[in-house]
Each structure stands twice: as C-alpha cells, then as structure tokens.
Amino acid sequence: MTERFSASVASRHMACHASADLSTAIPGWVPPVEDDTADNAANRGTIMHALFAQVMDLGAADLRKFSEAVAYIAALRQTRRFHTLIEEPITAEWLITKPGTTADLVLYTQDEIHVIDLKTGKIPVSAFENKQLMYYAVSYGHLAPKAKGVTMHIVQPWAGVMDSWYADTAKLHLFMAEAKDAEFRINVLEERDFGPGDHCMFCPANPRGRGQKGHPFCPALMDMYYPMAVDEAAMMSED
C-alpha cells in the first residue's frame, strides 16, 4: 500500500521512491508493530508535541511565567538522578481517617526528597512552615528512608516567588503530632471552635475570601471584619 505523501515523509519520498511502498519494493516486507506505550523517539515526540500545543495556547505573559517554573524544576532535577512522582495520589496513612492526597511533584532518592507545589496565584505564598507542604512531606517522606528531612518548594512565578524551605525529621514529627491532635479533636471529640486568622484566606465561609463563597459567613470573621455592623444588628433585634 502506498504511503501518503505527507509533510513528515516528503524528504524521504523525494529521495527514495521505493520507501513510499515498501511492501512492493521489498518482497515479504512486514511493517513494524506500533506500540504507543514503548519508550522510543516516536512516542516521546508525540507526547512533546501534545505538551507543546497545550503550553503554546497560553498568552505571552503566562508563557514566560510557566517557562520560569519549568526552568526552576529543571535546575533542581539536574542536581541528582531523582525518582519522579507527578501528581501521584497517596494515602495519608498517618491520620485516623486515612485521607487521600496528591502533591504536584515529588523528587526523591534514598537519602533526599523534595516536594514541589506549583501555584499560579498572584498573592505570594511562602514555603516557610507551610502546613500544606509539611502535610505532603510527612505523607511522601517514607520514599526516602535515609533522608534526615524534606526540602519543600513553592514555585509561584506569577507572584515572583521561587521559595524553598528544609524541615528536619524533628520538625516534621512535631507537625505530625499537631495535625493528628487537630484531626482527633475534629473527628472524635467533634469540636467546632472557630479559629480565625491568615489561614482563612480560601475558606468558603470567609466574607473576604479569595475563593468561592457559601452562606451564611463565618460569625467569628464577621465579628472581626464588621464589629459595628454586628452590634447594630444585635441592637435592632433587641428593639
């Protein structure tokens, strides 16, 4: 069967007409069996082209920021021959409820491990004592049994942040104990005390939150943000 004269084979067909119909030109010739799971140049090329198409759909500004994130991670990966987990789900076995969790990227060897979190927001986020990252660190830490701690990274070029922080095992064990205590109080003791603070930024009950909002709003935050409004409402109800 004659191969279609496409752009990718134009050079070959123009130089070797027989290559357009190898089954006729070479008696008994059998075409290779295509395996889209094999690690070969053709399949890698297909994957790269798919990624290229997705990334190129970004605007120029986002494309520059995305390239900064890729460059940061590429530099990190050049330091060791890391095993790589990309959005690999894992179960947090250390908690009572054993919830599932997924880090954006984990790089590890027997004695070193990095947890990377990509953020696309414009509000700067620090890696220092970041509890989301520490949660990941505790959950994935067993992958590097000889490591004395975990290095955590916030990759957030849209906010000009490329931040990392190292926590040793003692620090991580302390976080684990505090997290376990909070989970026990919530799920076993059924405590429902409010604790307003900076961590409320993306809470759906936050009247000034950055994410989607539910109703009614958190009474503790309402009292914090609008104390006079709360007092006036109380006075009106008394009347």
Image (tube, rainbow, N blue to C red):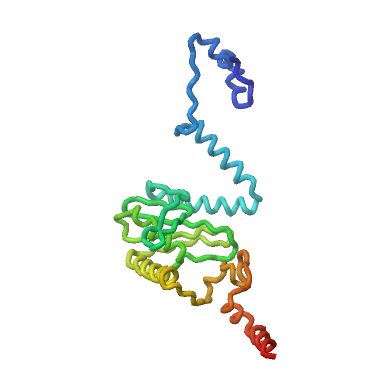
Up-down: is 31 above or below 144? above
Q: Quadrant of the C terminus?
A: bottom right
Q: Residue furthest top?
A: 27
Question: Could you tell me which residue is drawn at 58 percent across and 54 percent down?
Answer: 65
Count of marks placed on residues: 0
Quadrant of residue 119 in the image? bottom right
Q: Nearer the viewer, residue 155 or 33?
A: 33
Image coordinates of residue 45 in percent, x first then y, are 53, 35
Q: Quadrant of the N terminus?
A: top right
Up-down: is 137 above or below 43? below
Image coordinates of residue 157 in percent, x first then y, are 56, 58
Q: Residue furthest left?
A: 146
Image coordinates of residue 76 in percent, x first then y, are 44, 52
Question: Could you tell me which residue is drawn at 63 percent across and 73 percent down?
Answer: 216
Q: Residue furthest bottom?
A: 239
Image coordinates of residue 81 in percent, x first then y, are 38, 46
Residue 104 located left or right of residue 149: right
Question: Could you tell me which residue is drawn at 43 percent across and 56 percent down?
Answer: 115
Question: Could you tell me which residue is drawn at 39 percent across and 71 percent down?
Answer: 181
Residue 172 located left or right of residue 226: left
